[in-house]
Image (cartoon, grey):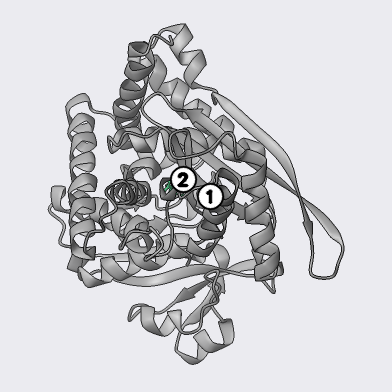
Amino acid sequence: MSTKGFNSFEIAQAQFDKVAALLDLDAGTREFLRWPMREYAFSIPVRMDDGRVKVFRGFRVQHNDARGPSKGGIRFHPQETVDTVRALSMWMTWKCAVVDIPLGGGKGGVICDPHNLSAREQEKICRGWVRQLVRNVGPVQDVPAPDVMTNAQHMLWMLDEFEALQGGRYPGFITGKPVGMGGSLGRTEATGYGVVFTLREALREHGVAVESTRASVQGFGNVSQYAIRLYQQLGGKVICVSSWDQKDQASYSFKRNSGVDMDELAGITDAFGGIDKEKAKKLGYEVLPGDAWIEQPVEILLPCALENQITPETVKKVHAAVKFVAEGANGPTTTEADVVLKDRGIYLIPDFLANAGGVTCSYFEQVQCNMNYYWEKDEVLGKLDSKMTSAFLAVSELARERKLYMRDAAYVIAINRVAQACKDRGWV
Ligand code: GLU
């Protein structure tokens, strides 16, 4: 979505251009990689529960498939735009490349607000999305997954529609499926856990004990909730989280100096991560304005909500105590704000590295589907940990050697891999 006047695609292209210049990429490759290879925009007519037909706009953008089928989630959001989907598809290309899995980058979306849709209406949107794209997606072309406001149930409806149209069983069409229906154990936890695996390594490299740190988190959806759980299991303390309040159409921050209790909060949160304000107050949480999460006196900030949240305006509020930022969301930091974080010497774990745990587990899900043999949860999470840790170590080593900002170092590795694949295929 075009939040607060920022265009995510322009930001993604600017990040790419900066590193492409550093890498001395030839003009043809540069032009090829700064735009998606394919884009689809379409209408999904749905007969609503009240009998009227409503038309939803849907998108799928395939940024690059040189290293394997396009891969990436589908977002349901009322402010979705094609430019945001373009940016997110590009970030998926770099994400799959930086963790070195054999997949390309894609992203999809539908302009809709699931808060206001019945389960039946959401099912119709999912099936309609697949009907529009059935010839352009699939296990060997483009493999969708969950993202903002979509979940395993949405994936299963999409799979069912795809299989009905194809006349066969194709569990590799989509990932993030329910466990028992081709899904992988650990997929729900994977993105949030992955954020913390990289954070744990960053702290270790700096000789900082997790137990000595405190964190403040933006968002209370799937990524945030599992990141908080693992970080607290490792001994850290989260003192503030923010969440979206659908009724007020605003976000609030919830603060408790003794630390947030995940089981307690999960009991007063809706399916979209909206925390009930009144119940939270009764449990001893201070309810503060939405941006308060960013000004907390903590060592670690975890933006785990949406894009364009750390802006030239909000970055001014980042407390002097902050030393680490791990981007659980895709594209949470705007270009100017990124420069401020860098100049302040804050150690950044960039989005497409920090949050690559989700797609890495999606890749494991594909592998398990292909074998038709499913691993235990510990096995999945162990493999996830080692993949995330080696990707992090490769990026941090390059950053150290070449004195690069972590975001740029991650880009160097990812762009080199993708550019090489395009070259080897004879495309550029
Ligand atoms: N939506 C997640 C992401 O942004 C996961 C994508 C996937 O599993 O394909 O990384």
Name the outermost residue toward the right: 52
Mark 1 packing: few (<14 Cα in 10 Å), some, or many (20+)?
Answer: some
Q: Nearer the viewer, residue 127 or 261?
A: 127
**Residue identifier under label 2:** 173
Please tell me how many numbered marks the rendered image carries.
2
Q: Residue at x 23, y 40 (%)?
A: 391
Most distant residue in the front direction: 167
> Foreground: 46 or 341?
46
Q: Who comes first in sequence, dot 1 or dot 2? A: 1
Above or below, comparing residue 141 to residue 245 in the picture: above
Locate the C terminus and report the quarter of the image it occupies.
top left
256 over 356 or under it: above or below: below
Which amino acid, by three-letter code, is at mark 1?
A: Glu
Disc 1 and disc 2 in contact, CB within 8 angstroms:
yes
Above or below: residue 244 compared with residue 280: above
Counting from the top left corner in percent of width and height, residue 415 is at 36, 24
The residue under label 1 is: 163
> Does residue 128 appear to the left or right of 161 in the view shown?
right
Could you say which is closer to the camera, residue 49 or residue 341? 49
Asked whether mark 2 lies closer than 8 Å to ligand 1, one says no
- Please tell me which residue is depicted at 48% across the width and 75% down the height of the picture: 254
Residue 140 point in image, percent of width and height: 43, 34
Viewer can see residue 297? no
